[in-house]
Each structure stands twice: as structure tokens, then as C-alpha cells.
Image: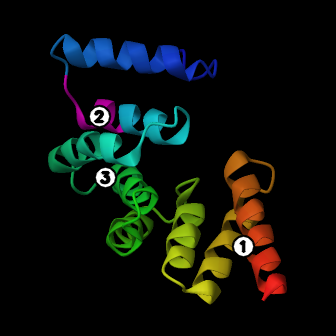
Amino acid sequence: MYERAHDYQQARVEYQLALDSGFQSAELYNAIAWLDIEFLGVAPVEVEPYTTRALTMEPNNADILDTHGWVLVQEGRAREGLTFLEQAKMLSPNIYCIDLHLGVAYLKMGERTLAVDHLTRQIARSPEDRFSQSAWKVLVEMESQAERR
């Protein structure tokens, strides 16, 4: 309910209460990690234990693979994160943010052509959503950096 209302801080509090009460599920750990990394600005190194726990519980869940890979990319471990992102893409090619995450990972690894390909796919999937807007921003920054050279 709080997530749908975009009250991410309160959603995080409620998820933590569930966890503290003894309820554990891969989806709960993943939801906490997603809120932390995507909306609450928590340092990736603090988020990784949640994604690792979720991944241990459900190693073939595309959403969890995506979150874990994205956290690793944000942590500066793009090559390692890419492995999880690619697995997520294979399991569920239309995850709403997967091409943004892959594009950023490839960019951080210096694979500009692959980055552009994935960022463009993200934009084509749903041009108006926030993930596509982020993809646009990355592409604009890439272009700006290329012009400065």
C-alpha cells in the first residue's frame, strides 16, 4: 500500500517490521533491497546482504537476479553484476527495467555499442516511464562525453 502511494520510507519501515517479526521470504528481502537501492539512496554495500539472502532462497527468480545484479553494478562491480543481469534477461526478457540496468552495466565496462543497444531497447519498451527517462539521461550523458573528446 505504501509503495503504491510512493511513500517508500514508510514501505521500508513496514517491510522491516515484517522481517523483524520473523517473516522471511525471498520477495521480502528483494523488496527491501529494491526500495533501498532504487528510492532511498542506501549505499549498495548495505543493500547487498538483502539481495544475497533473496538470491540464496530463490536463485532462479528473474526479479531477484535483476536486483542483485543492479546492486553489484551500483557497487562498482559491473562485470560481476552483468552475470546476474544477463541471467535475469534470459529468464524474463521483458522485466520493466532490465535493459536500463544492462545498458549501464555495459557502459561501465566500456562496451559502448552494447550499452546504447540496451538503453535504446529500454526507451522503446515504454518511453514515458521513469526507467526509460533514466535511459535517455544516460544516452545524453554519453553523447555529451563523446562531444567533449
Quick one: label 1 or label 2, which is nearer the N terminus? 2
Query: Hey, which quadrant is residue 19 in on the image?
Result: top left
Nearer to us: label 3 or label 2: 2
Density class for disc 1 (Cα within 10 Å; few <14, some 14-19, many ≥20) is some
The residue identified by callout 2 is: 29
Which residue is pictured at 36% across the width and 67% down the height?
A: 77
Single out the residue that lies furthest toward the front: 149
**CA–CA distance between discs 1 and 2?**
30 Å
Query: Helix, strand or loop at disc 2?
Result: helix
Give the main secondary structure of the magenta stretch.
helix
Pick whichever of labels 3 and 2 is earlier in the sequence: 2
Query: Is 29 included in the stretch rendered in magenta?
Result: yes
Circle 3 is placed at which residue position?
61
Q: Quadrant of the C terminus?
A: bottom right
Q: Amino acid at mark 2?
A: Tyr
- Visible residue check, residue 126: no
In magenta, the rendered stretch is 24-30
Marking on residue 120: 1
Q: Are marks 1 and 2 in contact (CB under 8 Å)?
A: no
Q: Position of residue 136 (x, y in %)?
A: 77, 63
Q: How many C-alpha atoms fall within 10 Å of the one at disc 2: few (<14), some, or many (≥20)?
A: many
Type of the residue with mark 3:
Asn
Q: Earlier in the sequence, mark 3 or mark 1?
A: 3
Secondary structure at numbered mark 1? helix
Where 124 sits versus 35, above or below?
below
Residue lying at 58% horizontally and 53% vertically, measured from the top left: 96
Q: Would you say 50 lies left or right of 128 here?
A: left
Give how far across and how far down residue 84 sits, in percent. 34, 65
Give the CA separation, mark 3 to mark 2. 13 Å
